[in-house]
């Protein structure tokens, strides 16, 4: 069975949240399919970039997508440089999307700093899990004030 589509490493996307203010997150996402990381400036932009990534990989294929034996997408020759995959300033999440059913995502998210993993049944539940992790943290500068990359609600 030569030329398998892809390995399990493509299922997990690393999300580095660098800023979280008043419920608005921004940061970077990394996946072996991407030659470089992608940046996002809002939850909606994060959702769009993740959905575009999943559509491009066709992995997991959307439940409503037409199946075919058509040409496979081009894959990155190698994963992005691990040195570029630094932690997020506010939080880092490893998101593993297993299914795309009912016009949403199902899978598991690991909050790396908190050492916890939870399953999610929808993109909304994923966003709420990330919010619960991020809203409990706040970075402060040496004078005790919130830094420009402040985290928390």
Image: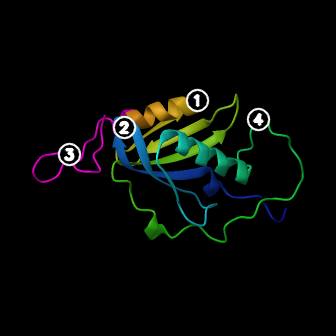
Image coloring type: rainbow
Magenta span has 147? yes
Q: Residue furthest left?
A: 143
* Number of the label disc, if any, that sits on residue 121: 1
What distance separates the C-alpha of mark 1 from that of mark 3? 34 Å
The span picked out in magenta is: 132-153
Where does the image place residue 94, in percent across and percent down from the top left? 49, 48
For discs 1 and 3, the disc positioned in front in the rendered view: 3
Specify which label sits upstream in the sequence, 3 or 4: 4
**Distance CA(mark 3)–CA(mark 2):** 18 Å
- Circle 3 packing at 10 Å, graded few (<14), some (14-19), many (20+), is some
Question: What residue is shown at x 38% (from left), y 54% (from top)?
Answer: 88
Foreground pick, 82 / 28: 28
Q: Earlier in the sequence, mark 1 or mark 3?
A: 1
Residue that carries the numbered disc 4 in the rendered image? 63
Q: Disc count in the image? A: 4
Q: Where is mark 2, residue-wise?
A: 133
**Residue 137 picture location, percent across and down:** 28, 40
Which is nearer the N-term, disc 2 or disc 4? 4
The image quadrant where one finds the C terminus is top left
Q: Residue furthest right?
A: 69
Label 2 to label 4: alpha-carbon separation = 29 Å
Residue 146's mark? 3
In the rendering, which numbered label is found on residue 110? none
Q: Secondary structure at mark 1?
A: loop
Frontmost residue, 59 versus 7: 59
Q: Secondary structure at mark 2?
A: helix
What whole-number distance in Å separates the C-alpha atoms at marks 3 and 4?
Answer: 44 Å
Depth order, front residue of 116/32? 32
């Amino acid at each position: 069975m030569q030329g398998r589509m892809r390995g399990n490493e493509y299922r997990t996307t690393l999300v580095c949240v660098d800023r979280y203010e008043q419920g608005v997150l921004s940061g970077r996402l990394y996946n072996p399919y991407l030659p470089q990381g992608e940046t996002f400036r809002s939850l909606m932009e994060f959702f769009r970039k993740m959905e575009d990534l999943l559509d491009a990989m066709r992995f997991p294929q959307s439940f409503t997508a037409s199946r075919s034996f058509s040409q496979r997408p081009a894959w990155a020759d190698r994963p992005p440089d691990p040195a570029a995959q630094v932690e997020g300033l506010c939080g880092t999440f490893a998101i593993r999307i297993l299914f795309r059913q009912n016009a949403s995502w199902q899978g598991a998210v690991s909050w790396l700093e908190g050492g916890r993993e939870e399953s999610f049944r929808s993109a909304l539940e994923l966003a709420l899990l990330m919010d619960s992790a991020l809203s409990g943290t706040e970075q402060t500068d040496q004078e005790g004030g919130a830094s420009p990359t402040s985290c928390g609600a």
